[in-house]
């Protein structure tokens, strides 16, 4: 499928969309070019994510979607441009910016193979600076919401790919971030997994979070959004 043929997800609730909703994540004038003769993957890209909204970015493999998400998450620093949540930037001391972010990378990363599922979520809660008094509660809530309760004592490396994806999604949502960044979240999920993911996105935006998810395929419209874009030749184009 060519990048121009990717369909934008159908808005989930256009009649209630709030154009004046608070700005949460602001990306302004982002530029990023990898070493070598190739053109920049991002060239003056700007995007504002607002509270209570879901934004979708599509495009072919290698178009720069993952780079965009990694810049938004503060994993990469922009070569030009700014990334901020209010007064916070990825350079803010104490990890205060990253505490606001829930990030799901593409693939099967960030899991400790020999940990049991509950241990994995508890470990992640510590890395995400969840207060000690809330860790156990949020771990149990995540197990329930992502359909992992019956697997809580199973080792991660003995889970199926779809079950591992649920664990990684649970980690992205666990610490109740206000900005949730999802890179190809449908990977390995069955129909029940799609439904779980859609429910948790809906729950998060109802609580005032914002969600940005990227995928190369138009069939990801199973997860609806308020705004859609395609990323091509370093530029974002809004899809009406």
Image (spheres, grey):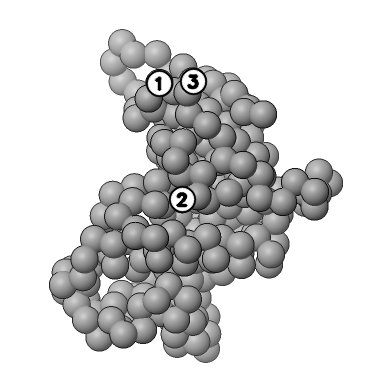
Classify 211 as above or below 178. above
Residue drawn at the location 16% of the way across and 72% of the way down = 158
* Residue 15 falls left or right of residue 198: right
Marks 3 and 1 close (CB-CB < 8 Å) = yes
Q: Earlier in the sequence, mark 3 or mark 2?
A: 3
Q: Is residue 99 above or below residue 137?
A: above
| Quarter assignment of residue 97 | bottom right
Provide the secondary structure element on which disc 2 rests.
strand
Q: Would you name the residue on which mark 2 appears?
A: 182
Q: Position of residue 9 (x, y in %)?
A: 57, 40
Left or right, 218 with reference to 53: left
Neighbourhood count class around disc 1 (C-alpha, 10 Å): few under 14, some 14–19, many 20 upward: few
Q: Is residue 202 above or below residue 213?
A: below
Camera-near label (1 vs 2) is 1
Query: Which residue is drawn at the image coordinates 38% and 71% (left, top)?
Result: 124
Between disc 3 and disc 2, the foreground one is: 3
Q: Residue at x 16, y 69 (%)?
A: 157
> In screen coordinates, is 117 left or right of 69?
left
Question: Circle 3 is placed at which residue position?
Answer: 4
Element type at marker 3?
Answer: helix
Residue 115 figure quarter: bottom left
Indicate the secondary structure of the residue bearing disc 1: loop
Displayed quadrant of residue 149 = bottom left
Residue 93 in sight in this render: no
């Amino acid at each position: 499928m060519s990048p121009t043929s990717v369909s934008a997800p159908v808005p989930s609730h256009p009649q209630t969309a709030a154009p004046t909703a608070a700005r949460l994540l602001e990306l302004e004038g982002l530029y990023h070019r990898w070493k070598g003769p190739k053109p920049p993957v991002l060239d003056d890209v700007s995007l504002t994510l607002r509270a209570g909204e879901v934004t979708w970015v599509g495009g072919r493999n290698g178009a720069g979607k993952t780079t965009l998400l990694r810049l938004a998450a503060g994993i990469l620093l922009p070569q030009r441009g700014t990334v901020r949540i209010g007064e916070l930037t990825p350079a803010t001391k104490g990890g205060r910016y990253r505490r606001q972010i829930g990030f799901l990378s593409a693939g099967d990363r960030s899991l400790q193979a020999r940990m049991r599922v509950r241990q994995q979520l508890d470990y992640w809660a510590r890395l995400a600076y969840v207060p000690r008094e809330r860790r156990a509660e949020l771990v149990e809530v995540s197990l329930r919401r992502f359909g992992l309760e019956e697997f809580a004592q199973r080792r991660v490396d003995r889970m199926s790919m779809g079950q591992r994806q649920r664990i990684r999604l649970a980690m992205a949502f666990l610490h109740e971030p206000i900005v949730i960044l999802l890179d190809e979240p449908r990977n390995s999920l069955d129909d029940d997994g799609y439904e779980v993911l859609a429910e948790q996105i809906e729950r998060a935006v109802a609580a005032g979070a914002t969600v940005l998810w990227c995928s190369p395929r138009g069939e990801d419209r199973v997860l609806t959004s308020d705004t859609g874009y395609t990323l091509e030749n370093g530029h974002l184009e809004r899809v009406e």
